[in-house]
Image: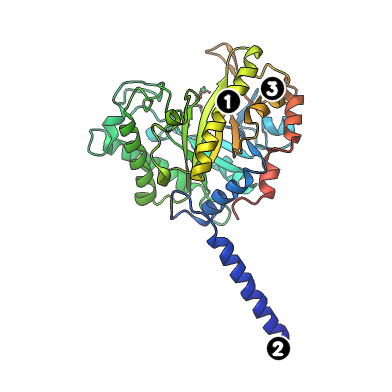
Amino acid sequence: MKYYNQRNIVFFSVFLLVNCQVKAQQELPADKNATKETVNLYNNLQKLASKGFMFGHQDDLAYGVNWKYEQGRSDVKEAAGDFPAVYGWELGGLELDHPKNLDAVPFETMQQFIQQGYDRGGIITISWHAYSPLGNKKSAWDTTHGTVATILPGAVNHELYKSWLDKVAIFLHSLRGKKGEAIPVLFRPFHELTGSWFWWGQRQCTAEEFKALWKFTFQYMRNEKKLNNLLWVYNTSGDFKTAEEFMERYPGDDMVDMLSFDTYQYGDNSQSNSFAEKTNHLLSIVQSIADKKHKLTALAETGYEAIPQTNWWTDVLLKAVGDNKISYVLVWRNHGYNEGMKKMHYYAPYKGQTSAADFQKFYQHEKTLFEKDAAREKLYQ
Ligand code: BMA
């Protein structure tokens, strides 16, 4: 008996020692006070990137082509047999106390969808098409020059901006797993920052103003709001040509965890090859920067509206990713028919869609990871 007890103590000590060493080797994300689950996610994503890339979809659980708010549904699941590994959600409108975001997703329902995805082992990423702080119902797409300057510390709209961050912080704090732990979120504010179509865009503010905005936001959310469940995603549009251009507004390694950009295929199928080649090239630029800095990478938004090409997934998107070790690609939302534009607006296939058979091949490809694959990796442990 005594012998067994001693042996158990030895085993236990060895276990503790090994475990501590493993934890000691863990790298911390930009937020040095990040929660255990967030640190684990950060480190596990670093490892996962050499195995394959996750597939993500915006608003996946909320609605799809020809359906809305039917529990358990997902166009991706119905087309491929599994949920996406990454769920994209969007906060635009929360800052104005709207009960629904700019795409009519109720924030309360969004919170439940986020919890469902996390509980199954999926990853959550959140963007924020914030309305313009200049008011008058100006949207994120308002391009009034100088808007950013008005919300920086000391400027006329700074208190208003802080009150917006307070609301976003309440929402982000409310996202909890079964044990009450904060759900880690890949937070992607001020997205497509090198474009000039949002009020925080390249022609709307100087690089210094943009960096100051990022710095204030990062520090306020971490230090004042005690949000320690965020991984910070730097996200440009796909219009940069060099590493210097991509990095022009980079706020610093101590405030960013993931480097990413957004790019979509436009035009017809004749553009597919050049889209794949260009995207692959841009990913390789971002990848080489991220490798040096030991940061994560993603193609944070992409897609080909209504996917009119039968083999787009394996012939175009897989080639676009190529050998780059990215964490995920996320395709945009399946709105369905857009009355205003008089056309279909969706980026993931649904069952029976033109590219659905190819999407199954894409799903089966060894490099692609959907939710079951992500769950198997236990990314939060
Ligand atoms: C765009 C479109 C819009 C939507 C916006 C924010 O690409 O899908 O309909 O409002 O994203 O989600």
Image x and y of residue 100, in percent: 48, 32
Residue that sits furthest to the bottom in the current view: 2
Eye-nearest disc, 3 or 1: 1
Q: In this view, does 46 lie to the left or right of 203?
A: right
Which quadrant is the N terminus positioned in? bottom right
Which residue is painted at 31% across and 30% down in the image? 148
Q: Does the residue labelled 2 lie within 8 Å of ligand 1?
A: no
- Against 177, residue 138 (above or below) is above
- Residue topped by disc 3: 312
Helix, strand or loop under label 3: helix
Image x and y of residue 236, in percent: 46, 29
Q: How crowded is mark 2: few (under 14 residues within 10 Å), some or many (20 or more)?
A: few
Closer to us: 211 or 344: 211
Image x and y of residue 229, in percent: 48, 49
Which quadrant is the C terminus positioned in? bottom right
- Residue topped by disc 1: 279
Q: Which amino acid does label 3 sit on?
A: Trp
- Residue topped by disc 2: 2
Closer to us: 130 or 202: 202
Residues at circles 2 and 3 in contact by the CB criterion of under 8 Å: no
Q: What residue type is labelled 1?
A: Thr
Identify the mark nearer the N-term, 1 or 2: 2
Closer to us: 209 or 81: 209
> Alpha carbon of mark 2 to alpha carbon of mark 3: how far?
66 Å
Question: How many discs mark residues in the rendered view?
Answer: 3
Helix, strand or loop under label 2: helix
- Against 301, residue 377 (above or below) is below
